[in-house]
Structure formats: structure tokens, C-alpha cells
Amino acid sequence: MAVGSGELAKLWPVKGFQLATGCAGIKVAGRRDLVIMALAEGAEIATVFTRNAFCAAPVQLAKKHLADTCRKSNGIRYLLTNTGNANAGTGEQGLKDALQTCASLAAIGAVDVEQVMPFSTGVIGEPLPIEPILAALPTTFTALDENGWAAAAEGILTTDTRAKGASRQIDINGETVTVTGIAKGAGMIRPDMATMLGYVATDARCARHDLQAILNAAVNKSFNRITIDGDTSTNDSLVLVATGQSPAVLDDGADRARLVEAVEQVCIELAQAIVRDGEGATKFVTVAVAGGASVAECLQVAYTVADSPLVKTALFASDPNWGRILAAIGRAGVDSLNVDDVKVWLDDVLIAERGGRAASYTEQAGQQVMNQEELSIRIDLARGDVSETVWTTDLSYDYIRINAEYRT
Amino acid sequence: MAVGSGELAKLWPVKGFQLATGCAGIKVAGRRDLVIMALAEGAEIATVFTRNAFCAAPVQLAKKHLADTCRKSNGIRYLLTNTGNANAGTGEQGLKDALQTCASLAAIGAVDVEQVMPFSTGVIGEPLPIEPILAALPTTFTALDENGWAAAAEGILTTDTRAKGASRQIDINGETVTVTGIAKGAGMIRPDMATMLGYVATDARCARHDLQAILNAAVNKSFNRITIDGDTSTNDSLVLVATGQSPAVLDDGADRARLVEAVEQVCIELAQAIVRDGEGATKFVTVAVAGGASVAECLQVAYTVADSPLVKTALFASDPNWGRILAAIGRAGVDSLNVDDVKVWLDDVLIAERGGRAASYTEQAGQQVMNQEELSIRIDLARGDVSETVWTTDLSYDYIRINAEYRT
């Protein structure tokens, strides 16, 4: 299941950024499971990786290669992604395997090995089958094309039921700047770094330092504000590439702000697409916490509500069992919370105030909101001026089925 | 579903502690949903309550009555429990309703209102129907009996599928001391204070201050070490009563230690019974973390593993998908964890070391352990000498069904 139509948006090509999708047959024969992305010379790259201590071999190697290219000033030129195997929990051998796939692509592309960044997604703890990857690389390489976005959006999927992409174009003094991105992820989703894999590219010119700042800001409004099951993956990786091939010249003020906004919008659209395609999702739920004294306590409340299995099963049942929302707020660990001041709404229906059910509330009004495929849980803590929003899904039979049968 | 046989143990009566179970018809006509417990004059009581900020009206009132009896030195004489309605999220009216039920029982028992402690469990956010409770109190009161434990164990249940009781007798210089307890709870279970309701009584003589110390210690080895769904209830309450009616005279050394051990054993047995009867549970899982630098980090790792939906669905599927265990350990937030030193076992089968699958591990060996109804996940962090154990269940279709249909 999934929420909304899920049709892949029109993805504008980004000058200087090519994509190719191939079939290595890593887990299933004939499935598109290998994606190469090529960055034109001079492109800059910014990255965000999982904070899971057991981070996967490709994540470890990607970080190392980024540092190596910084030192040598030769730049990342290829991103290599495989699905069907996460190459995580694979120890020393996993690092060797990841390095070998990078070396093979580097040879084909005539670049140094550190100029290739590896990404893997799929089952954890099984050795990466590198033979099929090495065998499929040369053919796949020949398919590199700036119009390869839609195929690549398919090629990076695992348990996802649909491809996820977003694209924006902005006009800077008559010149067009494009921001296009794709992402994958449907389970094991939660900050820090929520998508398992995300790739966003722009043809804007942007220094690496500034590019990283733009990415960090966008992530904290998008991928770091979604949760499906509270689990953080070992492989989460997001990159933002700036090829600098648009003729547009951006000033540091209004023009940069518009680029920031476009990147942010693409990231939010991708992050929300991941939630809509959450494993077993039947609802898309916005949890908005206002009136907090700090960002931390707003997020604490938002995530406690969003991750509560009892709230999630009530959402699945379209049951306005708002007591479970109050219980989740109450156990979120907010210091000396005055529960009598807390208000809770379902969309615009006030359901709770003064520690109990609102006088104006009717079960019918609550039920009407709950019946919707998309709805908001809004919470006012009445302690300050900070607000934060996260997006999540319900918890359904299908979540159990997908995750109980994942390896069978 | 539930794990193990679930037969109710022999519950020894405790001199000076009587129980009566009645049918008020709060939610379902004819269901046993009302329990009165009577403490003989001079009995001492110790309590632990939920830390949820939205704590229920009966919890607020029970705390107040305890303080009032301390001030007046007249002692708690009755515990009044209803199921079918939690009287939580009910605001000012909820407090009035709880007080009225206490006043009514106090009148029947010819004690002061503060000598009655109220307990409620059931749906949150609906007004407590007090008429049926008030109507059923007089008849129920006449049934008070020291042999009422088994009926009361049934009378306090909600979504539980079985009654939970435990009993120990120890011999102190030829005199018998009894410790008997019952508990209820199957969902919305997790520390702080894990059972929704628990009542333990002993005929030992014990000062209130010492009784509270004994209860606190026992709770941290039992009810505060279990998790079913990571949700903490608004109503969790546990009481330990000492009637002092056994002729045994306990010294402060070995005798007290034996009483402490008996209380602890009763609490652990009750806490584990709650896990075995966890909503939709098909497995009873011990998560044992050793080699930690602190209690906090051991519990952090243990709960992250025990509450991970991905680990829980793998347990439900009897799938030795140990990569999910590694991923959970990795995201538990342990500061500078050296993942290469971490070892993980399923029972005695070493599954992971040096950041990957153990060389000696075979899928068959892992599968054999996973097929069991009861199993251990053992984790060595190799950072220190502290160890902690928590107990949990899997996450099954039935958990979703029970919680999605709870109010229908």
C-alpha cells in the first residue's frame, strides 16, 4: 500500500550530470539494480551520511574517498549504487568488496579510484556479490545520459512500491537553474538522516562549503523530519551535486535564497514521497508541534507521537482514539509539562484541552478527519514560540507482512 | 496469542489482606470488572506510579490520599480497582468521579475517604461511568476474603488473555512469611513503571520507609525491565502491602534479605507474565546486554533492540536477520562505540563479531534458536563491567489487530 497517486513527476535534466541504469542480477535476475551517475569535471558535491555506529562499508568508503579527493583536489566523478545488498555488517571483506567495485568503475571511466563514491542498499549482513556488479558495469556505463533520471529513480528502489523524484527550475536573470533529485526508502526510516539513498543535482555554480550548508539546512527541514518506524539505517546517504554548468550567475542574496528554497522544496517533496510510500502505509500524517520552549522538546513530542505503535495502529484503524495521543505527549519526557495547558487538534478539530476531551469535540467530527488519507495531528504545548513538524505513517498489517517476509 | 502455558500459580493467602471481585458492567455486562482489596488496620503500603505527565485521575487521587493518610497517620485501608475505563484524560470531572467512588467505598467500610486508594484501567478519554460502580460496591464488599486472590487476578484484566499471579513462602525461624501478588497489563507497556496495575502483599512486618525501599529495588529488576511496545501508560500503578500479621520476627540481615528476594521473585514472575501475555506475543525474548560502561548505556542498547519494529518483526517471522540487531545497536546512541569489539549471540550461538557475521555462524544454527518460543539476544559491548537485562516480545499481526480494533 501507499498514500496518494505516486506518479513520478517530470524530472528536468541537469547539465553536467548523467545517469545510467543497468541489470546486474544481484538478488533477482533481470531487475534494474545498478545505477551509475557521472559528474562533469569541476562539479562540487555535498553529503550527509547515517550516524548509525554500524555504518555500512560503502558509507565508510564514500567518506574516505570524499576526504581523499578533497586532499588531492581531483573531485568526485562517479556515484555507484547497487540495490539488493546493503554491504553492511560485512566487516573487513565488505570494505574490500566496495573498494573493488569502485576500482572497476574508475578503470572504465579513466579516473582515480577515490573519485568513485559507492552506495548500497538491501539486505544487511550478507556478503556483497561483486562478480555480477563487475560484469554489468561496462554495458551500464555506455548508457550514461542526462535524461537518465526516471530510469535511475526506478533502479535505486528496494521495498519501495514507487519511484520518487522531484524537480524545480528557477529563473535567474533570464537564465534557468535546475534542481532535480531522486530518492529511495520505505522502511528502516528515521533521522538522523532519513532516506536510505537520495541524490539531488543542480547545474548552479556553488562552492563546496556553501553547498554543504545548503544541504544541511534542507535536510533538517525534510529528511530529518520524517519517521516510519523509528529505525535508522546503516546505509543512509544523501548527496547534493552542483555541476556549475548553468550560465546563470547567482548573487549571494536573493538569488542564493531562491536556490536554497528550490533545494529545500525538492528535498521535502522527496522526503514526503518516502513517507507516502512507507512500508504498509495507508495514511500520510503530519505531526505539528507548536508552543514549545525549544526545538529539542518539540521534536521529542513530535517523534514520541509519530513513533507510538498505539497512535499508529489507531491511525490505521481510522479510530480517533485521542487518549493515545495524550498518553504519548505525556511520556515524551518534556520537563515539568503543564498538561492543563496542552491542546490537541485533528486538522482543525480541537479534541483535547485542560487535560481532557474538549467540550466542543464530537466523535463524529474526529471520525471525519480520521477517515481521510492525509491528516494532521496538531499539538500546542503553550510553553514558548518554537514549532516543528514531522511526517509519518500508520502501522498496518502490511508493515508486519513486509518486514516479517523480507528475506523469504 | 501468548507465550507459555499461562496457568495461574497457586496463590497463598496473606493474613490481613482480603480481596473481593464483582461485576459492575462498566463496559460489558456480566464481566468481572470491579475489585476491592481490604488492608487490616496497621498494614503498611508502598507504591510506584506512572511518570506519564498525563497521569490519570485515579493516580493523582491515589497519591493525594497516600499523602493525606501519612499526615493523619490513619493508614490506607481499601484499594478500589475498576477495569473497562481508565478515567484518564478526563480532566476535572475525572477527579470528582474518582473521589466519589472512594467516598462511597469509605462509607461502606466505615473509614475516611482518604483511606481508599483508587485504580482504573481501560480506555482513555471517556468519562468514568460511576453509577454502575456505586451500585455494585455494597454486594462486592460482602465478598471480601483472604482467599480472593485468583478471582481478583481475573477481575483486574482488560486485553490480557490470562490471569497473572505469583506467590512465595519463606520460613523465618519456624514461622511462615507469605508474599503474593497479581498484575495485569498486555499493551501500552514500558517503563517507567511497566505494568498497568500490580498488587503485592505480604504478612511480614515492615516499616513503611523500608517497604518502599524494597519495592523500588524490586521494580528496577522486574517491571522496569520489560517492554512490549515502548508506550508508557497513564495509569501504571504498583502497590506493596505489608500487613505485619505473620508472627515471624525478621532481623535486619539475612531475614530481611530473604524477604527482599521473595518480593523480587514475585515481581519478576509477574513482570515476565505480562510480557508472555503481551498483545499478539508469539515469543518471549530476553535481551541481555553485558560489557557496558554504565547502566544507562546498557539499557539504551537493550531497549533500542527490544523496541525496534524491525527486530520485532524478524522475531515474529523466526528470521535470524541479525543485521537488524546490529543496526539497532548502532543507532542506540552509545558514545564512541567501537563496533569491531561488539559481539552478539542468539542464545549460545555467536552470530556477529568484528562488525560482521561470525566465521563460525551458520544460518541453520541461528534458525534453530529463532524457531524457539523463548530465546535470548545477548550483546557484549566490551566497554566495561555493567550488565542489564530486559524482556520483550515480537511484533505480530495480532498486535495490530488488537490495537486497531480496541474500541470497536
Image (cartoon, coloured by chain):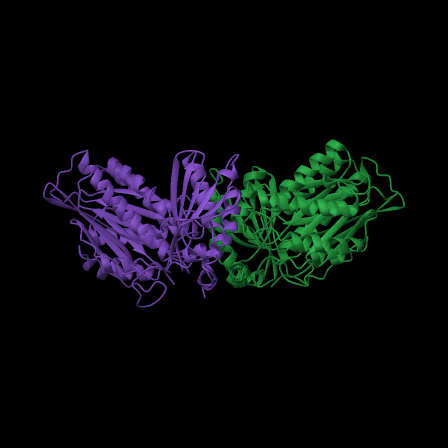
Chain colours: A purple, B green
Residue sitting at the far top: B71
Q: For this view, does B119 lie left or right of residue A102?
A: right
Q: Is residue A185 visible?
A: no
Quarter residue A303 falls in: top left
Residue B88 position (above or below residue A367): above
Q: For this view, does B28 lie left or right of residue B79?
A: left
Residue toward you, B329 or B178: B178
Residue sitting at the far left: A174
Residue sitting at the far right: B174
Screen quadrant of the C terminus of chain A: bottom left
From the top left corner, tell me how far across and down residue B222 is, in percent.
66, 47
Q: Can residue A340 be seen in this view?
A: yes
Residue toward you, A276 or B299: A276
Residue sitting at the far bottom: A29
Q: For this view, does B201 lie left or right of residue A314?
A: right
Q: Residue at x 22, y 62 (%)?
A: A139
From the top left corner, tell me how far across and down residue B266 is, in percent.
73, 49
Quarter residue A276 falls in: bottom left
Q: Which residue is drawn at 30% across and 68% down?
A: A30
From the top left corner, tell me how far across and down residue B203 is, in percent.
82, 45
Residue toward you, B306 or B271: B271
From the top left corner, tell me how far across and down residue B11 is, in percent.
78, 55
